[in-house]
Image (spheres, rainbow, N blue to C red):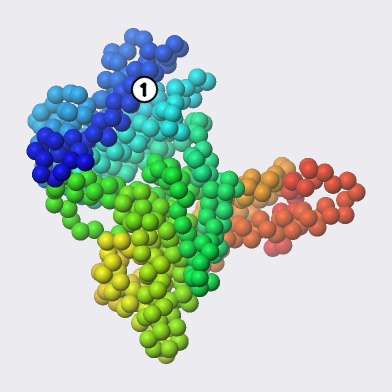
């Protein structure tokens, strides 16, 4: 690997080598799509698909460009070297004014992406060979191109937001099509077979790509989730994207992930990098996927090099607090030792400071804050709980407030999302619904999502409902004279009806 005292020319190669290769692959795919037999690309098109792709990439970079960039000349040089064009700063600014300033992502889709999707959805679509469609590969290229571009200009929330919005637009467009995608090795069909939002027990996915509890001498109220092996960042991000709902959560995490990537790129270039807290507050009602996302984020942090191992330690008040002075500090320190190199996830963290008549919870908080400071290079802490309670918890201590400055709110599921979760449970357990049952389930879950108590349990409520359906179906068919596979796997109206 090159050293940091290299000349500026060679330093640029350190950061651009991989993205240049990705861009060249994308150019090759563009040529393949255009010149293959039966190509959807018009034969009389004014420019080649490769040049259309270059234009789309330039629009993208113009859209995320920040006027307050710390090194605009270097960004222009990056564009010219990687897109194989010649454009000056003056012309780039004119291009932004003409093409990018008023860009409406609600109606805009890069033309090159549209033709990549056409090829992916054709019977003989060309594949990258890495388990992704060429459309998904193109999106990954755009994302890394944007991260590299931003790295030269500094790190700003505006750039991160615009990058996330643009990539989200591309993903939403591609996700509207039935595009082939291989199952990642050891994965879960893109993450869709893992039922998330059930935060009380470890589980395995249907394809056995999930997690199991590690066998060790850790107390039973501490759960350790170890990352699966041989997974790539692209696979993990695809798994995050595939989770049902959670659109705002995904956007916030994508912003954070891109900022981490950009920070690493700037460090490699020897550029000044602002300090960044990666500790998080996950707030929202139960069953909204907080624990599931935390497990996934631990693995993503590991792939990004933020933490050295990538395991997640899951704990609550009982896993940190003892009933005698001095014991709580020892217990909390031991949990932090287990979490070193990964993520410590503290559920219902507000219970550490709202108990009356004792201060053992505060002792745990004080110990935790010290370890977060002493081990800030290899320990990430995520605290979770109800929204208002978590705000009060963070505001109760200046040390907590200074270390936890990123809140991610997990919204309740909509009726449509709850239906998708129920359908996923049926698929994972080999159940189907007849017409009457399906209609009732849809009406019931829409009603449940619209009319519920303040601390609604979301996916847990769906799981409990599913389990009641299984029990009623078993009771109905157990005395039937002829029980066949169809009987065992079909939900009928009496099985799904609830007593209101």
Q: Is residue 166 above or below residue 264?
A: above
Could you say which is closer to the camera, residue 425 or residue 99?
A: 425
x then y, percent, for residue 32: 38, 17
Q: Within 10 angstroms of label 1, few (less than 14), some, or many (20 or more) residues? A: many
Depth check: give the residue in front, 103 or 184: 184
Q: Is residue 477 left or right of residue 332?
A: right
Q: Which residue appears at 13% of the width and 26% of the height?
A: 87
In the rendered image, the vertical position of residue 103 relative to residue 192, given as above or below: above
In-image side of 232 versus 404 (left or right):
right
Residue 464 drawn above or below residue 120: below
Residue 251 in sight from this viewpoint: yes
**Residue at the spot 15% in from the left edge and 43% down from the top edge:** 3
Residue, disc 1:
29
Q: Position of residue 98 (x, y in %)?
A: 19, 29
Residue 446 or 263: which is nearer the viewer? 263
> Looking at the figure, which quarter contains the C terminus?
bottom right
Q: Position of residue 304 (x, y in %)?
A: 32, 49
Classify residue 134 by image quadrant.
top left
Q: Is residue 192 visible?
A: no
Which residue is pictured at 14% across the width and 48% down the height? 270
Between 41 and 265, the one nearer to me in the picture: 265
Q: How many marks?
A: 1
């Amino acid at each position: 690997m090159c050293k940091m005292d290299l000349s500026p020319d060679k330093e640029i190669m350190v950061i651009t080598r991989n993205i240049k290769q990705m861009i060249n692959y994308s150019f090759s795919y563009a040529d393949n799509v255009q010149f293959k037999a039966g190509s959807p690309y018009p034969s009389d098109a004014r420019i080649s698909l490769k040049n259309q792709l270059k234009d789309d990439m330039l629009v993208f970079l113009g859209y995320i460009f920040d006027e307050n960039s710390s090194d605009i000349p270097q960004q222009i040089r990056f564009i010219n070297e990687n897109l194989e064009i010649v454009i000056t700063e003056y012309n780039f600014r004119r291009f932004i004014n003409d093409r990018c300033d008023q860009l409406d992502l609600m109606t805009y889709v890069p033309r090159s992406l549209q033709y990549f999707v056409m090829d992916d959805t054709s019977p003989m679509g060309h594949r990258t060979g890495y388990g992704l469609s060429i459309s998904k590969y193109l999106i990954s290229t755009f994302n890394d191109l944007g991260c590299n571009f931003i790295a030269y200009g500094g790190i700003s929330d505006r750039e991160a937001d615009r990058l996330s919005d643009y990539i989200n637009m591309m993903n939403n467009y591609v996700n509207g099509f039935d595009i082939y995608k291989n199952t990642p090795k050891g994965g879960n069909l893109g993450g869709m077979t893992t039922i998330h939002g059930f935060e009380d027990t470890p589980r395995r996915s249907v394809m056995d790509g999930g997690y199991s509890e590690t066998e060790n001498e850790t107390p039973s109220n501490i759960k350790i989730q170890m990352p699966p092996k041989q997974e790539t960042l692209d696979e993990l991000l695809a798994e995050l994207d595939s989770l049902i709902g959670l659109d705002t959560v995904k956007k916030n995490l994508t912003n954070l992930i891109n900022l981490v990537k950009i920070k690493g790129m700037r460090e490699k270039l020897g550029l000044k990098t602002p300090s960044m807290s990666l500790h998080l507050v996950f707030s929202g009602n139960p069953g909204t996927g907080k624990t599931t996302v935390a497990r996934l984020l631990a693995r993503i942090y590991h792939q990004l090099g933020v933490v050295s191992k990538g395991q997640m330690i899951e704990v609550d008040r009982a896993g940190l607090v003892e009933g005698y002075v001095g014991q709580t500090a020892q217990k909390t320190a031991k949990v932090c030792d287990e979490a070193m190199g990964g993520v410590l996830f503290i559920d219902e963290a507000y219970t550490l400071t709202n108990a009356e008549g004792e201060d053992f919870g505060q002792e745990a908080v004080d110990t935790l804050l010290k370890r977060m400071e002493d081990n800030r290079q290899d320990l990430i802490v995520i605290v979770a709980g109800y929204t208002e309670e978590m705000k009060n918890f963070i505001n109760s201590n200046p040390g907590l407030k200074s270390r936890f400055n990123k809140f991610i709110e997990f919204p309740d599921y909509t009726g449509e999302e709850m239906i998708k979760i129920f359908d996923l449970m049926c698929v994972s357990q080999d159940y189907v619904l007849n017409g009457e049952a399906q209609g009732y389930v849809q009406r019931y879950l829409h009603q449940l999502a619209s009319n519920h108590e303040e601390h609604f349990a979301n996916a847990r409520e769906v799981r409990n409902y599913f389990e009641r359906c299984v029990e009623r179906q078993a009771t109905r068919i157990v005395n039937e004279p002829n029980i066949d596979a169809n009987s065992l796997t079909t939900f009928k109206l009496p099985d799904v009806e609830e007593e209101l």
